[in-house]
């Protein structure tokens, strides 16, 4: 039996976004007040983009959203961006993380 790094046509990955912790107001070193801010998370994998719902106005938002992505041989990086939602002006990026899929999977292709 041989092994290969190539993905099958139907390979998929599920990613669960649960919550945000330790959010600080930009430049202040302190967390938002009790009402907090509204946040959402954008996920980019290959050509696919998914996004959580906009959170309630709380200081530690949670979602428990599950996203499924199709994987191809060209899919190699996952990008997560956290945005603060503004009603009047453009939403602002407050955090970004990029990682290779290889770093997420163990020997058997499990996360």
Image (cartoon, helix red, strand yellow):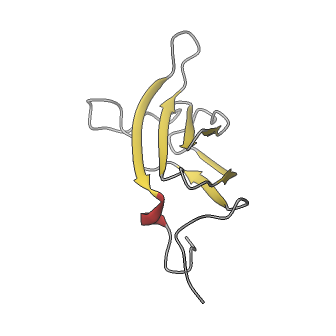
Left or right? Give the position of 81 relative to 48. left
Residue at the limit of the structure toward the top, as seen here: 88
How many numbered callouts? 0
Residue at the limit of the structure toward the bottom, as seen here: 1
- What residue sits 68% from the left and 52% below the top? 70
Left or right? Give the position of 26 relative to 20. left
Front one among 11 and 4: 4
- In the rendered image, residue 63, in percent from the top left (x then y), is placed at 65, 48
Left or right? Give the position of 107 relative to 87. left
Residue at the limit of the structure toward the front, as seen here: 2
- In the rendered image, residue 84, in percent from the top left (x then y), is placed at 50, 29
- In the rendered image, residue 57, in percent from the top left (x then y), is placed at 59, 32
Residue at the limit of the structure toward the right, as seen here: 10
Front one among 105 and 40: 105
Q: The C terminus lies in which quarter of the figure? A: bottom right
- What residue sits 56% from the left and 66% below the top? 6
- What residue sits 48% from the left and 37% below the top? 82
Q: The N terminus lies in which quarter of the figure? A: bottom right
Front one among 9 and 91: 9
Work out whether 109 lies above or below 70. below
- In the rendered image, residue 89, in percent from the top left (x then y), is placed at 51, 11
Front one among 58 and 2: 2
- What residue sits 51% from the left and 15% below the top? 90
């Amino acid at each position: 039996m041989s092994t290969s790094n190539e993905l099958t046509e139907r390979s998929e990955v599920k990613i669960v976004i649960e919550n945000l912790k330790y959010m600080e107001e930009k430049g202040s070193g302190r967390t938002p007040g009790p009402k907090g801010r509204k946040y959402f998370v954008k996920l980019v994998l290959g050509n696919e983009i998914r996004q959580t719902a906009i959170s309630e106005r709380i200081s530690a938002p949670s979602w428990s959203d599950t996203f499924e992505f199709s994987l191809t041989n060209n899919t190699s990086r996952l990008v997560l961006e956290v945005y603060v939602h503004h009603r009047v002006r453009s939403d602002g990026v407050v955090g970004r993380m990029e990682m290779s899929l290889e770093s997420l999977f163990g020997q058997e292709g499990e996360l």
